[in-house]
């Protein structure tokens, strides 16, 4: 199957390992993850200058300023990350934390902040983002007594380097963080990527009664 | 994984990529593939090395390379240009060779040096089948005179057709003070044909 600018999927996976974004306007992507594009796009470093207003509004993470770039223009952008699986997610007025090397790109409608967990980024607001995972994303239901902080999600999900299909750090921490603080407001955005991502209706419900930061 | 059924035929493959076989197949190291002495000399001079192994006989041979995806490409008399490390195996009927990619004068030279792909590329020509390896499968993208495509040199796997590639840079003073966009080098493909890319950057931090 040969793709061209017209037949490439729009905002969907080309195959499980690459994703095509219709760029119209601005978007943040991780540096070096562009594999190809049609159209006229420009890649501008975060600190380069012309997008100061945009960056002030949505990129509040100086530690990672050198890891992301702003894409502008119109075109079809294909992203890939080390042959990892790529999924798109919709965040709806939510709050979620991702391991920074697995965050491939996000809409400027989201606000990016450094997480309290080192190596993680927290996203606030409504918009789409793309994350990569070594193997498919697994959604886990947090333990029922768990209410406090999402910080355990990152460290405990470290997988042995040889495992290819276990829980990914990114996904797990994404989910736990999102669940713990704002309830189930993240859903898988792309349609063709394989996987057993639950639809938003089947996502685990937060335990009723207990306020988010009560007893552990 | 690639399975090749041989009926008294010959196939060339990356050395060490054979993982199993059945039948009566003879393997022999082949430094030159199907390109003869001149080709071998060309390769050793240009550094566009492909350490190959030929398999000849009747039977079935399985090839694999680090769990990478295999994409089959059939050639009908055209020429396929590939990065030598992406070639897994090809039909004994195809002629392989090396081609100088620095045609664009200084631009071409810079391209080879900057992208790390060197100044030469491997060509395969004729009627037959070719298997290339890539991370996550090779994506075929059309290039037409109206719609050029830009690709990351590290994600580029190969191309076919009447395609001209040029290196586009946005290297400026920013690059040298660490403010580069990270996509400083892009290959621009113009003309008519198909470009194959993979979902990963070669030589990345795996």
Image (cartoon, coloured by chain):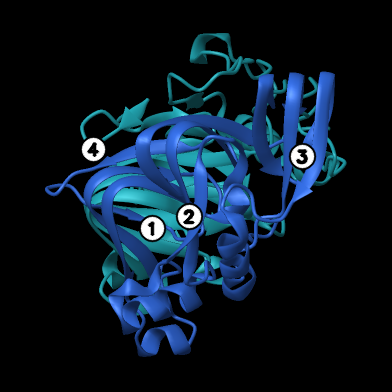
Chain colours: A cyan, B blue
* Of B78 and A118, the residue lying toward us: B78
Residue under pointer 4: A5
* Of B171 and B106, the residue lying toward us: B106
Q: Nearer the viewer, mark 1 or mark 4?
A: 4
| Separation (CA) of disc 2 from disc 3 | 44 Å
Q: Are marks 1 and 2 in contact (CB under 8 Å)?
A: yes
Residue under pointer 3: B17
| Separation (CA) of disc 1 from disc 4 | 29 Å
Q: Quadrant of the C terminus of chain A?
A: top right
Label 1: chain letter: A
Q: Are marks 3 and 4 in contact (CB under 8 Å)?
A: no
- Helix, strand or loop at disc 3? loop
| Separation (CA) of disc 1 from disc 2 | 6 Å
Q: Nearer the viewer, mark 4 or mark 2?
A: 4
Q: Nearer the viewer, mark 2 or mark 3?
A: 3
* As drawn, B40 above or below B139: below
- Helix, strand or loop at disc 2? strand
| Separation (CA) of disc 3 from disc 1 | 48 Å
Using the image, tell me which numbered label, if any, was put on residue B72: none
* Between discs 1 and 2, the one toward the N terminus: 1
Q: Which quadrant of the structure image shows residue B116?
A: bottom right
Using the image, tell me which numbered label, if any, was put on residue A58: 1
Residue under pointer 2: A112
Left or right of A53, for residue A82: right
């Amino acid at each position: 199957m040969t793709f061209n600018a017209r037949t490439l999927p729009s905002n969907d996976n080309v195959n499980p390992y690459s994703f095509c974004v219709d760029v119209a306007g601005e978007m943040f992507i991780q540096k070096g993850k562009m594999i190809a594009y049609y159209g006229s796009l420009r890649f501008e470093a975060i600190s380069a200058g012309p997008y100061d207003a945009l960056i002030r509004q949505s990129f509040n993470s100086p530690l990672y300023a050198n890891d992301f770039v702003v894409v502008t223009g119109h075109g079809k952008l294909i992203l890939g990350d080390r042959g990892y699986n790529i999924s798109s997610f919709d965040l709806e007025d939510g709050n979620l934390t991702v391991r920074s090397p697995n965050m491939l790109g996000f809409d400027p409608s989201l606000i990016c902040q450094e997480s309290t967990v080192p190596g993680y980024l927290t996203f606030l607001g409504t918009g789409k983002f793309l994350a990569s995972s070594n193997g498919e994303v697994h959604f886990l239901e947090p333990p029922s007594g768990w209410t406090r902080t999402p910080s355990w999600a990152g460290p405990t999900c470290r997988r042995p380097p040889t495992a290819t299909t276990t829980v990914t750090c990114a996904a797990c921490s994404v989910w736990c963080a999102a669940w713990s603080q704002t309830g189930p407001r993240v859903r898988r955005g792309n349609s063709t990527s394989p996987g057993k991502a639950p639809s938003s209706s089947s996502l685990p419900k937060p335990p009723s009664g207990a306020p988010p930061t009560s007893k552990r | 994984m690639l399975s090749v059924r041989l009926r008294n035929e010959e196939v060339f493959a990356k050395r060490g990529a054979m993982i199993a076989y059945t039948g009566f197949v003879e393997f022999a190291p082949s430094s030159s593939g199907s390109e003869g002495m001149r080709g071998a000399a060309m390769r050793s001079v240009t550094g566009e090395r492909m350490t190959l192994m030929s398999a000849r006989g009747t039977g079935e041979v399985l090839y694999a390379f680090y769990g990478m995806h295999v994409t089959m490409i059939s050639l009908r008399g055209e020429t396929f240009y590939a990065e030598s490390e992406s070639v897994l195996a090809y039909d004994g009927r195809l002629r392989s060779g090396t081609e100088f990619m620095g045609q664009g004068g200084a631009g071409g030279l810079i391209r080879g040096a900057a992208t790390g792909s060197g100044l030469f590329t491997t060509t395969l020509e004729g009627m037959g089948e070719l298997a290339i390896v890539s991370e996550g499968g090779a994506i075929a993208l059309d290039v037409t005179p109206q719609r050029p495509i830009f690709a990351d040199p590290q994600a580029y796997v190969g191309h076919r057709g009447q395609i001209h590639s040029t290196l586009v840079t946005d290297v400026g003073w920013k690059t040298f003070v660490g403010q580069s966009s990270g996509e400083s080098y892009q290959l621009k493909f113009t003309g008519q044909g198909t470009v194959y890319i993979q979902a990963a950057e070669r030589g990345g931090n795996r």
